[in-house]
Amino acid sequence: MDNYDPNFCEGTHTIRITMQQWGFKGHIAFPVGGNCKGTGVLQNGFDFPEYDIQEDIDHYTENDCAFAYRDDGDGDGWYSCRMKNSAGDECDFDDLDENDIKRMIVGVEIVNFEKDEVKE
């Protein structure tokens, strides 16, 4: 991000999450709108992954780890992903719940901000 203007709060932040298990890493990114800045967005601006279903995941702006939500049809669901190590080897992680995902998160950052256009 080249510029993070403190004078504008109303807009859309792009949040990037890094997940890691052993040497395997993956990234996802998604937009978060509202009237917040900095840690307010990171702490309170999103509730990943509690409410994200596949329809939400399909709108992520980055998903280099095939992060997905699976539903068994009875309202129970789980997450899966395929992460890579530095050599390009892949490892599949399946049957993950929200707590499993949260334990895999090693980084959360704001990578972009677009202010809302003022309509007159």
Image: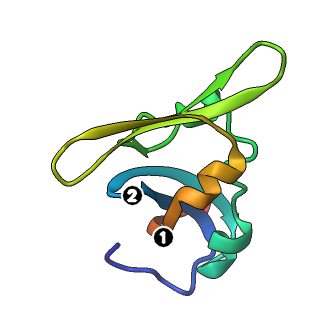
Per the image, the residue denoted by label 1 is 109
**Between 105 and 111, which is closer to the camera in this rendering?**
105
Amino acid of disc 2: Trp
* Residue 102 visible (yes or no): yes
Residue 81 is situated, as x and y percent measured from the top left of the image, at 47, 37
Q: Looking at the image, is mark 1 or mark 2 nearer the viewer?
A: 2
The image quadrant where one finds the N terminus is: bottom left
Assess disc 2: are there few (<14), some (14-19) or many (≥20) residues with their C-alpha within 10 Å of its C-alpha.
Answer: few
Per the image, the residue denoted by label 2 is 22
Amino acid of disc 1: Glu
**Disc 2 element:** loop
Assess disc 1: are there few (<14), some (14-19) or many (≥20) residues with their C-alpha within 10 Å of its C-alpha.
Answer: some
The image quadrant where one finds the C terminus is: bottom right
Q: Residue at x 37, y 79 (%)?
A: 3
Residue 61 is situated, as x and y percent measured from the top left of the image, at 44, 44
Q: Is residue 83 left or right of residue 30?
A: left
Q: Identify the residue at the far bottom of this view.
A: 6
